[in-house]
Image (cartoon, rainbow, N blue to C red):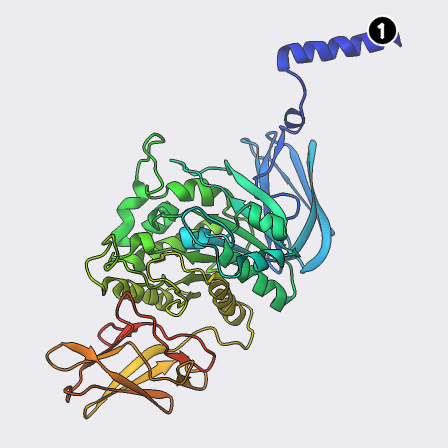
Amino acid sequence: MKSSRLALVLGLAVSVLFNGPATAQTVNSSLELPAIFGDNMVLQQNQPVPVWGEASPGASVTVTFAGQTKSTQADAQGKWRVKLGPLKASFTPQTLVIRAGATRTFTNILVGEVWLASGQSNMEKPIGKQPGQKPTFNAESELAAANYPGLRLFKVDKMLAAQPQANLGKFQPWQECNSNSLDTIKFSAAAYFFGRDLHTNLHVPVGLIESSWGGTRIEPWTPPAGFAAVPTLRQLASLNLSSNKVSSTTPIALYNAMIAPIAGFAMKGALWYQGESNCGETNYDLKMAALIGGWRQVWNEGDFPFYFVQIAPFKYHGGKTVRTPTAETLPEFWALQSKAARHIKNTGMVVTTDLVDDLNDIHPRNKMEVGRRLALLAREKTYGEKVVSSGPTFKSLKISGNRAVLSFNHVAGALGSPDAQPLTWFTIAGADGQFVPAEAVVVGDKLQVTAAGVDHPVAVRFAWDELAQPDFINAAGLPAEPFSTQVPVD
């Protein structure tokens, strides 16, 4: 017996001498999973759920969850992947077990709806304090009430990479949503309010993944596959990035570090709140197509829902810092965002012209309503609820004498204003092309627009100014999209 103990001690000593002390990491080094998998996560219901990682080359891998067992073998590089069959929504905490020589166990897992939220600072903005920004409205009371154990949060921290990464470099792991976790990790307010609305209306667990970075453009978030599919952007797909020259403005660099490592994690859809850093460009709709198409390709889940936010009124041209050529640059950009929503399959857009409390603040504080409107899009378009998710959108123009008669989609029963006051921010032009303030009157489900001195109108604009905060809504209380009848709607 003594000789056996001596041999064991000597063996351990030799192992430490040549290999270093044994740790949890070295013991489990033959089995690795991406950081997006963890305790407290939510797995997507009603669709296949990929689980993947690395093990010793040729190792047998077994994945067990919710009564399912899936097996595979790691390839010559040690990579493996299985797909769990569709899961049923459940608030009952369950355990995911992966075995490949070593064992990884994840606990307190729920099954429900998973959404990714991304973009720049208006998506990044938390409920509470953020340097250089004001808290959202009612921040203290909202945080105090934010106890939803069925709502789970995962946050990707800011990272850059010249090449697509297999795993996240920095992140805040899955946590149950409560006042402390929501505030401590500074989770996106817009995404939280969206998730809370889904959670309370659908009565299922909800998992939210935030991957955002303030001040960033759309190009760094876009994968090469997205650029390659848009002819005018194809040259960006073959950029040869150098690790010592990558910045937060470099195309593909944020995708490589903050999206690629989670691509393939089963989810229902994505939310996007970005555009301020691209405002003034004339091809943003094409860049949206590249982003959305690229994400859909790398996720390989088909045309999953993609809902985004129209950027808010702000003094881009008339502020202390002149950011755009004219006060009409912003509405021209709004038109490109609207075009993207019309032309890209399974998308939708939230209008925010009525949610700005300070035109000098590029970070409007009413993120609760932004989240609610995003949730309305999902509830109607994705989950089939009978709710109204859009305000009026311009459909057609007919000239009748000195009147421009406008028809709209998404009337939802009636057109008007919240306070029954005259409609604002309408202008009209005659043959000379000069737009002047106009009067807009609701007649049935249409608007009649006129102006003194314009006897033969040819065009109408609505909210066609960066400062526009109009009052035109439908019966559901949702605001109309800004429009110009000179901009095609098909």
Residue 86 x/y as whole percent: 64, 57
Task: Count numbered badges in the picture.
Answer: 1
**Left-right relation of 304 to 1:** left
In the image, 269 versus 440, the foreground residue is 440
- Seen in the picture, residue 439 relative to 239 is either above or below; the reply is below
**Left-right relation of 399 to 31:** left
Image quarter of residue 340: bottom left
In the image, 146 versus 74, the foreground residue is 146
Residue 485 x/y as whole percent: 24, 77
State the SS at label 1. helix
- Seen in the picture, residue 482 relative to 245 is either above or below; the reply is below
Residue density around tag 1, few if under 14, some if 14–19, many if 20 or more, within 10 Å: few
Residue 301 at least partly seen: no
In the image, 472 versus 133, the foreground residue is 133
Residue 196 x/y as whole percent: 58, 61
Image quarter of residue 100: top right
Image quarter of residue 88: bottom right
Residue 138 at least partly seen: yes
Disc 1 residue type?
Ser
Quadrant, the N terminus: top right
The residue depicted at 61 percent of the width and 29 percent of the height is: 56
The residue depicted at 35 percent of the width and 54 percent of the height is: 290
The residue depicted at 33 percent of the width and 48 percent of the height is: 219
Residue carrying label 1: 3
In the image, 73 versus 201, the foreground residue is 201
